[in-house]
Image (cartoon, grey):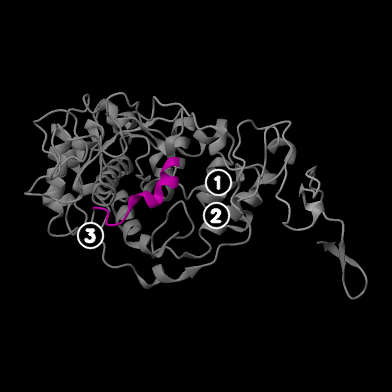
């Protein structure tokens, strides 16, 4: 990483040029691209899979935009028109040659000099809209040891053993700043736009931009998640320390008049919470699936009450301020977590019986072999029955061949209708 004392003074780039808003139509095949890093990445994909991988990119970004004048990136064009100011700032910072590197054991540099985002830095909308992208990026990081952005759809088509030769290796400091499972923070755009520069090492200006932009991304998602979902996430201490070093007033710039106060209280609540005691409340599995890692968060208020954020679920410690009307002796929430004799979701096995499962729409044989099934479907008629029990219908509902009881009291079996409808030409159109 570059030394803090040698950070360049870079003026903020002005508004994007006119060329940034000019649409750029990608070619129908990656082989028709000019000489660029993206073409090299697609050349690493087997020829039989290149077409489908390219179509995935065109489906995700059918219209792209020309790069600002004088800017070169790994991509031939901007994936979004709003990326122009960010790309210009990053290119300006990377154009400065640093004449010294720090030791390998120095943590990543996180400083405003390397920030390329424009205010507001904090997220304004629901960050869980990007949950699938963040989940995909994390899976690739864990499986392949590389940093990729979800827009790099071709990465999954490159052979796993060859990905390290084409993409950004995960830095040695990344483990201390990894997001909790389920946290919807996405990879900074520098990974896709300037991956070639990032591959030069962990002590480069590009690595400083990556570290700073990652901290800003996590801080923005953390803030927005609490304001929209009431999630107080348990972030790694390294990440919290880095964005505290950026000064909360700067992180909250442009995010609203109460953003700084809310972020300060959010940070205070995070640092004062006994996360070990909160362990039972951190065991909410993603989607309730067994075998998934827990999501490290507790519920909190979405607003400041008397300048404080209250916890929605008590942890048994009177030192923690609770939400209005909630005390340490209040009953547990509707979820039942923490109630005496009630197991938490990660301890509770799936015990839903067959009577609670909807009947299968196909396969009558499978339906007749289920035990203790509900004899009544949505229509109020029998749908399936245990083995050895015949399906019957009351007499008088349709024809006798539809099943039921004959006038003599003997049950009749249901048979499919055999009458065939015919069209004007006499051709059969189907059964009635």
Q: Residue furthest bottom?
A: 424
> Would residue 266 be found to the left or right of residue 431 on screen?
left
> What are the residue bounds of the magenta stretch?
122-135
Q: Are marks 1 and 3 in contact (CB under 8 Å)?
A: no
Q: Mark number for residue 154?
A: 1
- Sort mark 3 into few (<14), some (14-19) or many (20+) by Cα contacts within 10 Å: some
**Is the magenta region chiefly helix, strand or loop?**
helix
Q: Mark number for residue 57?
A: 2
Instruction: Of the two numbered discs 1 and 3 on the same chain, state the one appearing first in sequence.
Output: 3
Residue annotated with mark 3: 12
Instruction: Of the two numbered discs 2 and 3 on the same chain, state the one appearing first in sequence.
Output: 3
- Sort mark 2 into few (<14), some (14-19) or many (20+) by Cα contacts within 10 Å: some
How far apart are the two marked residues, 1 and 3, measured between alpha carbons? 33 Å
How far apart are the two marked residues, 2 and 3, measured between alpha carbons? 31 Å
* Label 2 vs label 3, nearer the camera: 2
Q: Which residue is drawn at the image coordinates 63% and 61% (left, top)?
A: 28
Q: Quadrant of the N terminus?
A: top left
> Would residue 186 be found to the left or right of residue 424 on screen?
left
Secondary element at image label 1:
helix
Q: Quadrant of the C terminus?
A: bottom right
| Residue 123 on the magenta segment | yes
Secondary element at image label 2:
helix
Q: Is residue 3 visible?
A: no
For residue 83, above or below residue 222: below
| Residue 128 on the magenta segment | yes
* Label 1 vs label 3, nearer the camera: 1
> Would residue 1 be found to the left or right of residue 326 on screen?
right
């Amino acid at each position: 990483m570059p030394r803090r004392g040698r950070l360049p003074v870079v003026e903020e780039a002005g508004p994007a040029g006119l060329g940034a808003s000019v649409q750029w139509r990608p070619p129908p095949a990656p082989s028709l691209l000019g000489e660029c890093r993206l073409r090299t990445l697609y050349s690493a994909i087997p020829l039989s899979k290149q077409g489908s991988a390219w179509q995935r990119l065109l489906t995700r970004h059918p219209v792209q935009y020309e790069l600002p004048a004088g800017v070169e990136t790994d991509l031939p064009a901007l994936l979004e028109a709003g990326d122009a100011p960010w790309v210009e700032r990053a290119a300006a910072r990377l154009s400065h040659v640093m004449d010294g590197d720090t030791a390998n054991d120095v943590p990543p540099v996180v400083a405003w000099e390397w920030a390329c985002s424009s205010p507001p830095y904090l997220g304004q909308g629901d960050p869980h809209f990007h949950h699938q992208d963040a989940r995909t990026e994390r899976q690739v990081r864990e499986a392949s040891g590389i940093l990729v952005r979800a827009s790099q759809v071709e990465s999954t088509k490159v052979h796993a053993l060859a990905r390290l030769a084409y993409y950004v290796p995960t830095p040695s400091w990344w483990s201390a700043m990894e997001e909790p499972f389920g946290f919807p923070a996405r990879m900074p755009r520098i990974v896709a736009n300037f991956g070639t520069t990032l591959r030069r090492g962990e002590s480069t200006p590009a690595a400083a931009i990556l570290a700073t932009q990652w901290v800003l991304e996590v801080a923005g998602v953390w803030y927005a998640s609490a304001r929209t979902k009431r999630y107080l996430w348990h972030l790694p201490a390294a990440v919290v320390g880095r964005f505290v070093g950026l000064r909360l007033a700067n992180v909250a710039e442009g995010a609203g008049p109460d953003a700084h106060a809310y972020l300060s209280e959010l940070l205070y609540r995070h640092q004062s919470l006994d996360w070990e005691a909160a362990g039972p409340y951190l065991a909410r599995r993603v989607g309730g699936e067994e075998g998934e890692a827990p999501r490290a968060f507790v519920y909190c208020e979405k607003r400041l009450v008397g300048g404080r954020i209250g916890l929605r679920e008590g942890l048994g410690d009177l030192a923690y301020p609770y939400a209005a009307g909630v005390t340490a002796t209040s009953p547990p929430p509707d979820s039942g977590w923490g109630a005496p004799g009630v197991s938490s979701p990660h301890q509770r096995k799936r015990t839903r019986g067959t009577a609670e499962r909807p009947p299968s729409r196909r396969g009558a044989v499978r339906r007749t072999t289920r035990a203790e099934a509900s004899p009544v479907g949505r229509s109020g008629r029998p749908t399936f029955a245990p083995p050895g029990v015949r399906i019957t219908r009351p007499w008088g509902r349709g024809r006798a061949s539809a099943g039921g009881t004959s006038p003599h009291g003997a049950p009749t079996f249901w048979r499919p209708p055999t009458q065939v409808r015919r069209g004007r030409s006499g051709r059969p159109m189907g059964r009635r």
